[in-house]
Amino acid sequence: MSDVISDNQATETAVSEQTQEIRTSLFSACVELTKPGITKLVTITALVGLLIGGLHHGLTGIGNWITMIIGCIAGTALASGGANALNMWYESDLDALMDRTKTRPIPSTRLSPLFVLWFGLILTIVGSGVLWLTLDLMPALIAVFTTISYVLMYTPLKTKTITNTLVGAVPGALPTMIGTSAVAPGTGFEPLTDPIGLMLFLLMFVWQLPHFFAIAWMCRVDYHKGGFRMLPSVDESGNHTAAAMIFSSLLLIPISLLPLRYIPELSGWATGAAGVLLGLMLVWLSIKFARLRTDRSARVVFFGSIIHLPMYMTVFVIEAFVRGVL
């Protein structure tokens, strides 16, 4: 009798462990669908827009700040995660052809395309709803348009034209305006003309260019397998890729100085110095890539861009709070 009980307990334990493993695997696959790195970056840029815009336009009340910050973070993260999941659903056939993406949830058969489609739609709808309830209608509409332009405009163009990077930089930069449009004055579409939102949009738009050109160079063989028409995949010499990296890196410098012109009460020497020094660093790394044309030098540009944006935004926000609050 005791042997039977022991066998039953062992079976129950094995089933329980297997069930837990399935749940863990499902959870990790769902997290992977959201592309956590991209989602985190997008959420941070939206939050920066809210913080800077709130300080400039005089948002008051600790309750307002807390509600809007939580809503901005939660809504943007959910909507961004949904857009990324829908992108994986759309590109699953091509992902299966490339080494770096063939282990994603759909190509690896860990999740079905239908599950991923519904998962992406639900996250996008819920995230947009959170933005509407906690911020305003315009931030929610921006989130919806960002998803539409990312999935239905940028994604299809990746196999058709090398200009897809420019198109893709639009949905990549739009989330900055989620935060600014929530606090900018005006009705209807007026919040979209807010100078802070436009400045941050322009910064994010241009920053993405050297960042993604570096990725595309490192992954050019894989992109060719998948049929993606990225600039480096049709630029074997690297001449055009290097020129695009250098030009866009140079362009970041004057763009990063725009706050000193349009919101001088919140930005000064610290923001200006950060913009110039970090911009020159990225220019130098891009010039180094132009000389070497290696995957390693492209990787250095990629990591340089990862350093550039967070550091610049951190300095910008800190100086804005020092000037606007203290």
Image: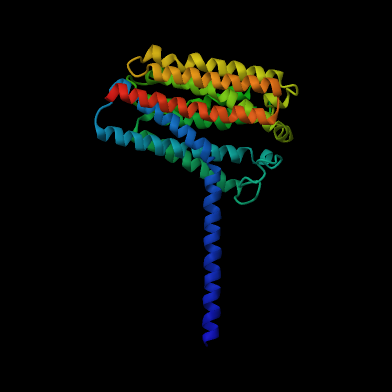
Between 322 and 236, the one lying in front of the other is: 322
Q: Indicate whether 166 appears above or below 261.
A: below
- Residue 274: image location, x then y, percent: 45, 21
Where is residue 293, by image quadrant? top right
Which quadrant is the C terminus positioned in? top left
Colour convention: rainbow
Q: Indicate whether 97 appears above or below 318.
A: below
- Residue 296: image location, x then y, percent: 67, 31
Q: Is residue 137 visible?
A: yes
Between 124 and 197, the one lying in front of the other is: 197
Between 118 and 308, the one lying in front of the other is: 308
Name the side, left or right, on which 1 lies relative to 227.
left
Name the side, left or right, on which 265 lies relative to 293.
left
Residue shown at 63%/31% (left/top)?
299
- Residue 238: image location, x then y, percent: 71, 22
Where is residue 214, by image quadrant? top right
- Residue 111: image location, x then y, percent: 59, 50
